[in-house]
Amino acid sequence: MNPFNLFFQFADSFAFIVLSAVGLAVIFGMMGVINLGHGEFIMIGAYGTTLVANAGAPLVAAMIVGVIVTAVFGFLVERTIVSGAAINWVAERTLGRSVIEPLYDRLLDSMVATWAIGLILTQGVRIVFGNSIPQLNTPLGSIQYGGFSYSVYRLVLSLVAVCVLVGLYAVFTHTKFGVRARATIQDPETARSLGVNTDEMYTTTFVIGSALAGLTGALYAPSLTVVPSMGTSFLVEAFVAVVVGGPSVLFGTTLSGGLLGAINALFTNLYGTFFGQIAMLLTAILVIRLLSNGLTGLVETVRDRKVGE
Amino acid sequence: MLTCESLTVAYDTTPILRNVDLTVEDGEIVGIMGKNGAGKTTLMKALIGLLDLREGTITYEGTDVTGVASNERARLGIGYIPQGRDVFPDLTVEQNLLIGESINADDDDPSYDLVYEYFPILKERASQTAGTLSGGQQQMLAIGRALVGNPDLLLLDEPSEGIQPSIVDRISEDMRTINRELGTTILFVEQNLGVIRGMANRCYAMKRGEIVDELTGSMLDNENQIANYLAV
Amino acid sequence: MSGTRDPAVRQSPAVRATGSDTDTLLQTDGVTKRFGGFTAIDGIDFGVNTAELRCLIGPNGAGKSTLLKLITGQHSVTDGEVYYRGEGITDLLPHERVDRGIGMKFQVPSVFDDLTAAGNLRLPLQRVVTNGDLAARVQEALDRVGLSDRADTHASELSHGEQQHLEIGMAVALDPDLLLLDEPVAGLSMEERNDIADLVTALNGDGIAFVVIEHDIDFVARIADEVTVLHQGAVFREGPIEQIRTDEKVRRIYLGGD
Amino acid sequence: MEENAHSLGEVEKKTVNTVETDQKSRNNVRQLDPSSRNRREFLAASAAAAGTVLAGCSGSTSGILGGSSDDEAVTLGILEDRSGNFALNGTPKYNASMLAVEEFNEEGGILDKEIETFTPDPQSDNSRYQELTRQAIQRENVDALWAGYSSATRETIRPIVDRNEQLYFYTTQYEGGVCDQYTFCMGATARQQLGSVFPYMVEEFGSNVYTIAADYNFGQLSADWVRVLADETDANIMDEEFIPLSVTDFGSTINNIQETDPDFVMALLVGQNHTSFWNQRTSAGLDIPMGTSTVMAQGYQHQRLDPPAMADVYGGFNYMQEIPTDRNQSFRERYYEKFPDADYINEEAVNNYFSIKMYAEAAEAVGSTDQADIIEELESGVNVSAPEGDISLQGSIHHMTHNMRVFRCDEEHNITVEAQEMIPEQFLSETVGADLTEKDETTQYVPANFYEEANTTQ
Amino acid sequence: MGPASAFDRARAPFEGPNTAGNTRGFWIGFLAVFAVLLIYPLLFGAYAASNAAQFLFSAILGLSLCFVWGYAGILSFGQVVFYGIAGYTFGLLSLNFGSALVTTLALPAAVAIATLGAFVLGYFMFYGEVRDVYVTILTLVVTLVLYTFMGQTAGSEWTIGSVALGGFNGMPAIPNLTLGVDESALRLSGATFYWFTLLSLAVIYLGLRALVNGRFGYTMVAVREDEDRTQMLGYDVRRVKLLVFVIGGALAGFAGVLYATWGNYINPDVFGITFASIPVVWVTVGGRRSLLGAIVATVAIEWFRQQLAVTGSQYAIVVVGALLLAVVLVLPEGVVPWMRARLRNRSEHPQSTDSTGVVE
C-alpha cells in the first residue's frame, strides 16, 4: 500500500462524501426536511454546467450558472411544494382556502414528496435533453509522483470541499442571515416574536441547500458522466454522511466525511473497491447503532462528562 | 399605545383567555398579575402574535395589528421578552443580541452600548454560548436582546421566574430606569408580589383567563389585596 | 449535595438501600442531571415513604419535572442512584420501573387521541387482566374516574378535566404503589380541581403514595402531608405545608411577598 | 482491410435467399411432442384444473370474457427500454426495430400480412419486463419477441419465454453461453468480441495485461474469457480488478494500474457510472492503450465524451456506425432519415435490425408464422445480409457468426477499422459441444466449467 | 334473524376502531368483491389471472408496510429486504433439492428466514434505541448494502449448494409454488396461483384486521401515538416494535416467495432504491392507517403503472411522480381515509349533497 495513493484516495473520498452530503445536511439539519430528490438537484447543477459549457462558456462561468439554476429551482420547489406557499396563494384565491400543509418537520412526508420530485426530474430531464448530452473534459491535467499520476482537478475538489465547509461555517456564525437562520431553527416561535421573518429564513436555507447541491453537480460535471440518472450515485453517500454526522450539521458532515473517507480509502486500498464501499456502509450502520446522535452526539457526550468532572 | 378589546384565545375547545380588555398608555409601566395557569403567558403570546385570536382586536399605536404576523409586530417596535430561558442556547450572547436588531424597523441603529451599559456581564460573556449562562444572566440577555432594537413597547413575561431574589430586584430596578430614561413603555406579567409592587404604575389582576380587577395608584400599596390575587 | 435539607427528616440513602427501612418507598441518592452544559438537577436526595402524599413545588425551571423523569427513567441520570423498595433501579428502563409499581401522569394531558376513553383505559388494563372480562374491567375503571358516559368518545374530544381524570385512571389501572403526578390541575376550574383533589385523596387512602407537582398552593395545602421545595435543581426546603407556607425564603423565591 | 469491407458491401443484393441450399442441415428434425407445440396448453390445463372445481368450464386461456387475438397480422413484440437506466442503449434498439418493420410493411409485410408491433416501454425495470413479456406472449400472442438490453433482463424473462415456448431474439452483445432452444442470441459473444481485439492488442503492444471489469456477471465472465484468451496467446494477466457498478471514482484503480505498469489494459466496464473512468484516466494522465468489448459500440462514449477521453481505446465489435461500407452508409441514411434526432446506431440496434429481417425471411421460407416451424427453419442455418456485412446463423447453437472488426479511437475521437475477420461463436459449438437440433436445453454455460484458466480468479 | 346475527357474530373479531368498514354493508360488499375476484380467472382467463396475481401479492407487501408504518409508526424502507431474502431463500432451497416436498417446505422455510432477518435487524435497531427517521434511513442503507452485496455475487465463489446467486443476473428457473408430496403435489400456476394468492391476501387482511383491533392493535397504536407514554403504562416499547417489525418482515417474506415463484426468477433489483420506495408510495397513496387503503392503492397503482408502461409513453414515470406528489400534498392522510371521511360526512349531512352512494 502506497501512502501517497492512500492520501489521494482519502482526499478524493472525503471530497465526494462532503460535497454529496452538504446540501442535504443543510436542508435536513436546518429545516427537518429530508430531500430524497437531493441527487436530482445535484444532477440539475451538472446539467446546467455541462449545457452552458457546451454552448461555449468558460467552465467556471458555466459552473456558476449551474449553481444559480439549481438555486432557482430550489426556490421554486420550496415556494410551491415544501412550504406550499405559492399553491396555497392560488388556492386561497380560487377555492378560498389553503390546500397544502408545509412539509417542515414532516420528515416522512417530506421524504415521499421529494422522492416524487426526484422521479419527475430524472425522467423530465431525459425527455427534454435525451439520454445523454455531450460530456465535458476534466480540466487541469495531472501531476506525477513516482510511478503514479493524479488528476489535479480531483485534488482541487477536495480543497473546494474544505472551503465549502469553512465558508458555511462563516456564513452560519458570522453573518446576520446565518445567525437568524440558526435562531429560527432553534426556536422559531421566539425568533419570529423578535422580528425574524422565519418563512424567509426557511426559504433562504432551502435555496442555500439547493445551491450547494448545484455546486456539487457543477464540480463533478467534468469528472463524472452526466446522465439523467446520475443523482443516485450521490444519494447513498449523502445519507450515510448526514446520519453518521448527527445533529450538528457542519461539524457532523466534516467528521463523517473524515471517518467514512478514511475507511473507504483504507479498505479500497487493501481489498478493492467493493470492500471499500461495504466497509463504509457497515461503519455507518455501526455508528448509527452505537451512537444514537451520531458523531457530534459522541463529541457532546464526552464534553458533558468533562463538565461533570 | 396598546389597546386590546375582548381578546379570546382557546386551545382546541378550552378557552384560555376570555374577553380580555386592556389598555396601555405611552410611557406607562403596566403589570398583569395572576397565578400560574391564569393565562398570563397566553396573553403575552397573543399580544406579540404567536397565538391566533378566536375573537377580539389588538390596536398598536392606532393601527389594527390583529392579523399581523408576529415578526411584523416586532418590526413595528414591540420588543418581546419571553418567559424563562427562551434565549437561543447554541448561539453566543452577541449572536442572541443580534437577533434583537430586527425589532423596530424604523430604527436601524442597534444600541449595543446601551445594553452593555445596563448589563455589563453580557459584554464580558459576549462570545460565550447563551446556554451556559446562569438563569439570571439569561434573563438579562433576553431583556438586552429586546432592547437592542430600541423598542417602543416591551412585553415582559415573568421576569422573576426561576431567578435569585437579588437579581430579581435588580431587574425591576433596571426596567424602571429604562422606562424613565428611554421612555420605553412596558407591559409585564408577574406573580411575584415584590416585582409587581416594585415596577408597576398600574396593574391588572387576572384569574382563569379573565381580567378581574384593575389596581391603580394607592391600591398598589395594599399588599394584602395584591396577595389576594396571587398564590397565597 | 444540597446542604439545605433537614438531616433529621430522613435516614441516609445507604441505610435505605439495604431495605432496612421498610417505610421508605423511593429514595434518590445524589442524583444529578446535566443537559449540554446546563445542570438541571444537582445532586438531589429525595425520598418518599409508603402511602405518603408529597408535593413538589418550586419556580418554573427548578427541575421538578426533570426529577420526576429521572425517577420514572425517561431521563437517564448523569450521576447518582435511584432506589425503589431498597432496590437500585437506576439502570432500569421506564417500563421495568412501571412493573415495580411506579406510575406517572404527564404534565400536559397525554392521552392517546386516536383512541376512545375506553380504548385508553384498555391499554393498561389489557396488560394486567389476562383472564376474565376485559370489557367489564374497563367499565369499572371508567366508573371510577367518572367517565362511564364518555366511554366511546375519542380522547381528543374530551374536555381538559376529563382528560386529566382519564389519565389518572390509566395510571391507577396498573395498581401502582407510587404515583407521580405532574401538574394534575393546571388549567382546570375550581370545581374540577376539587374533583381531582378528592380523587387523589381517596387513592392515597387506598395506600398509593403520591408525588404531586403543583403550583396551586391551595390545592397543595388541601392534599399534601409533606412538601419539598426545589430551587435551581436542588432541594431548597422540606417540611409540612404550614411550615413551608410561612417560610420567608420560600416566599421570596417562589410564593411572592417580601 | 477496409478494401475488404468495401467489397463485402457490394455483394449485398446476392445474399437474400439461400434457404434451399441449407436444407441439408435439417437431417435432424426434432420429433416435437405434439402437445408442446401448443404453448398455451399448460395454461389452459391449469385454469381448467381449478376452474372445473368452481364452474366446470373454461378450457381456454382467454376465459369467458377474454378476447381472442387477430390472426390477420404478424405481431412482433419489441420490448426495449426508452426510459430508466438503459434508455441510452434501448432507444436505438427500438428505433432500428421500427425501421425494419417499416421497411417490411412498405414491401407488403411478411407473408403478405402487415406487421404489427407490441412495443411497451419496460423502463429498464426487470419486474416490468416480466409482466410485459407475459403480456406479449399470452395476451398479445406475439409471433416473435425481441426484448431486453442487459443480461439480467434476459435472465429475468428467459424462464417465461421457455415455459411458453416463445421464439425469442436477444440482440445484445453478451458474455455468451446461453444455450436455449427458444432463444436466438444475435449479438456477438464475449469470446467473439474479445477474440477479435485481444490477440490484436497482444500483437501490437505486448503480452502484459491488466484487466478491469465490472463486478457483475458480464464483467466476471468477460474477465474469464480474457484469461482463456491470454492462455491461448501466451499473454500474461498481471492483475485484475472487479469494480462494482455503483463506483464512480476510479482514483485507486488508476493508481493500481500505474503500480502494475502493464503493456495494455483490458477495460470491461459497464454502465453509466463506469463511463466516468475514461475522463478520469485521461485527467490523471494514464496513457496506456486500452482494449474493450463494451464501450463505444454500445454507449457511443467517443461521441458523448469530449476528446481525448477515448484516445487509444481499441474495441472488438461487429458493428459501429462508422463502418465505411456502402451498405452501412445506405443503412445509416435510412436510419437517420427516419430518426433525424437520433444519437447513434449502436451494435445492438443493428442486431435488432438484421434479426427482424432474418425472422421475416425464415417466415417466408416456411410459409407461416408457426414458431416451431420457424425455429426449425432458423436451426437449419440461414444467412442474412446485415449492415455489418453478410453473416450467418449457426443453427445448432442459435448464435451468429459475426463480421468482427477491431476499431480504434484516436485523439480526436475518429474511429478507424484496424482489423476484420469472420468469427463464429466457438464456445458452445466446439468447447461445450452443444447442439440444439439434437438436444433441447434452456441453460447457460460458463467458461469456468470448461477451462482451468477461467476458474482461477487472481 | 338467525343467519343475520351469526353473520354479525362472525364479523365481530375483525371490527374495531382501528380499521375502516365496521358495518354490515361493508362486509356484504367485501364478500361480493371477493366473490367476483374468485371467478375472475373464469371470466378473463389464465393470463389475466396470472397478471392480476402480481397485484395481489404486491398488496401483501403493501400490507406489511402499512402494518409497521401505519399502525406502529415505523417507516421501513426495508420491507423489500425481507421480500428479497425470502425470494432468494426459496430459490436456493427449491433449486438445490428439487423435490416437490422440499419445494413445498421451502415456502415456510423462506418465510422463517425472512422473519429471522427481520428479528435480527429489528433487535439491532430497536434495542439500540434507533428511532424515527433514523430507523427509516437505516433500513434504506441496509437495503442498499444488500443491493450492492447481491450485485457482486456473480463469481463462481457465490454458489450455494449447486445454485449460483448470480449477481445482477439473478437466480433463474425458480420452480412454481408447489403444495404436496411427489406426484400428487399441486404445482401452482396461472389461475391456481391466482387463487392461492387471493386467498392468502384475504386471510392476511382479515388476520391483520383481527390483530389491529385486538389487544396488540391497541398497543401498536399507543406506540405510534406516543412511545414515552406507552412505556409509562408498563409496555416494553422496544419489544412491541420488534414484534411488529418481525410480523411485517414475515408478511413481506411471504409476498417475496410468491414474487419469486410467479416470475420463476429473482435478482438484486428487489433491493434497489426504486423497488424499496414503491411500497412507500402505495401506502402513502392508500392511506397509511388503512389496511384496505394499502390493498386498493397497491392494486390500483401497479395496474396503472403497467398500463402506462404498455403505452410506452415516456411520460409514464412523470405521471406517477406527479400523482404521488399531489396525494402527499393535498391528501396527506391518503385517498381511502379521505374517501371514507367524505362518505361519512355525506351520511351525516345527507341534505348537503345529492346523498347517493351512502353506505351504512
Image (cartoon, rainbow, N blue to C red):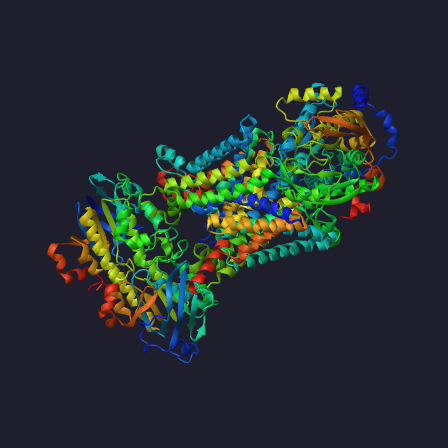
Examine the rendered structure and indicate whether residue C239 appears above or below residue E70. below
Q: Position of residue D390 (x, y in %)?
A: 80, 25
Examine the rendered structure and indicate whether residue C167 appears above or below residue C208. above
Identity of the residue drawn at 75% across and 48% down: D457
Examine the rendered structure and indicate whether residue C100 appears above or below residue A136. below
Pick the front one: D65 or A80: A80
Q: Quadrant of residue A88?
A: top left
Number of numbered discs visible in the structure rendering:
0
Pick the front one: E297 or D230: D230
Q: Is residue C127 left or right of E176 when viewed as pictured?
A: left
Residue D343 visible at all? yes
Residue E281 visible at all? no
Q: Position of residue B159 (x, y in %)?
A: 26, 56
Q: Position of residue A148 (x, y in %)?
A: 67, 42
Q: Quadrant of residue D108?
A: top right
Examine the rendered structure and indicate whether residue C199 appears above or below residue A110. below
Question: Can you name the residue that lies furthest to the bottom here?
Answer: C20
Q: Is residue B11 left or right of C96 when viewed as pictured?
A: left
Pick the front one: D379 or B194: B194
Q: Quadrant of residue D153?
A: top right
Q: Position of residue B81 (x, y in %)?
A: 28, 50
